[in-house]
Image: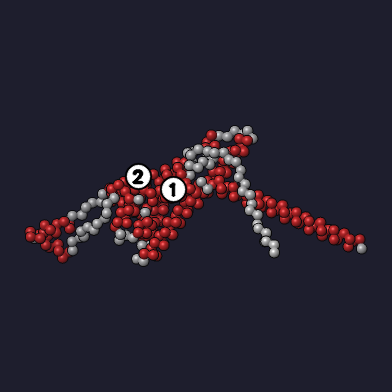
Amino acid sequence: MTNPTRKKTPEIIKKPYATGTPMDGETWKRAGFFFGTQLLMAFLFLLVCSMTGFSQPILRILVNLAIISAVLLVFYNNGMSYGTSAVARGEIVYQKREKGSHVAESEAKLCYHPLKGFLPGLLGTLPLVILAVILAIMAQKQTTTQGTLPGWLQGYLVRDEIGGALKSYTNHAAMGFMDIIRILMRILLLPYINLVGTSDTYALLWVERLGPVLVLLPAVAYGIGFTRGPSVRARVHTEIAENRKKRIRREKRERKLRRAAENRRGPEQLN
């Protein structure tokens, strides 16, 4: 009994490329774009995640985990695309140097570097990280506060025996700086807040304390995706080479069939 033939694994083709610097002329531009993307993401969270606070814990956890995974996957894929283009630039610069052509310093800096993908994300997220650190340091367990005084009790405010006790219900504290930071961070961390549920005050406290780490996750996903650039570029070269080999084999097979057909027609014409 003969073993079935196994498909031969294609040899990975890696072309040499020049290495750039962690920071280049596009770093701050990409950092600004990353910051804008974070704000857009917070706006989308406000629209979408406000409808995913289901009362069923399993459904709420699954939906919000899917949202978090989808967001991180988008940043990962964007970083991988950026890393692939940086490697392609490095290959061009390497070929120019091999031919003795002049390469501008600004062009050389744009080539792939393992840290290049992390800097735009970290710089673009830095303002949000600073706010998240402030909230993490000042975060306290949220407690219920006094509500508003019902209308039918307004007349008792002028009575000396009970008016003093009701005065506290009429004092409304103005929104402070920490309240604004908490609102902004909770919008940005809305999927994680829905994940633990708004009724668990201890879990909400830990989400706020872990805010700096959670805010940085998209930047980390972007940077990790960037480091996949060389392997993706190598896979592209491998697929191109494999397609070229398939085309050559197909052309040889077609030429062989044509020669066989011509050989068969030759004796028939002699008869």
Label 2: state its secondary structure: helix
Q: Which mark is residue 63?
A: none
Which mark sits nearer the N-terminus, 2 or 1? 2
Q: The C terminus is located in which quarter? A: bottom right
Left or right: where does residue 216 sit relative to residue 79?
A: left
Residue sitting nearer the eye, 132 or 158: 132
Q: Is residue 142 visible?
A: yes
Which residue corresponds to the image point at 36% horizontal and 66% vertical from the top-left?
Answer: 56
Which residue corresponds to the image point at 17% horizontal and 58% vertical from the top-left?
Answer: 169
Indicate whether 258 appears above or below 130. Answer: below
Left or right: where does residue 187 sit relative to residue 142?
A: right
Label 1: state its secondary structure: helix
Q: Which residue is mark 1?
A: 219
Which residue corresponds to the image point at 85% horizontal and 61% vertical from the top-left?
Answer: 264
For disc 1, the neighbor class at 10 Å (few under 14, some 14 to 19, many from 20) is many
Residue 120 position within the rendered picture, expressed as x and y whole percent measured from the top left: 45, 44
Q: Is residue 51 visible?
A: no
Q: Tag count in the figure?
A: 2
Residue sitting nearer the eye, 129 or 30: 129
Q: Which residue is mark 2?
A: 130
Q: CA distance from mark 2 to mark 1?
A: 15 Å
For disc 2, the neighbor class at 10 Å (few under 14, some 14 to 19, many from 20) is few
Indicate whether 256 appears above or below 128. Answer: below
Q: Residue furthest front?
A: 1
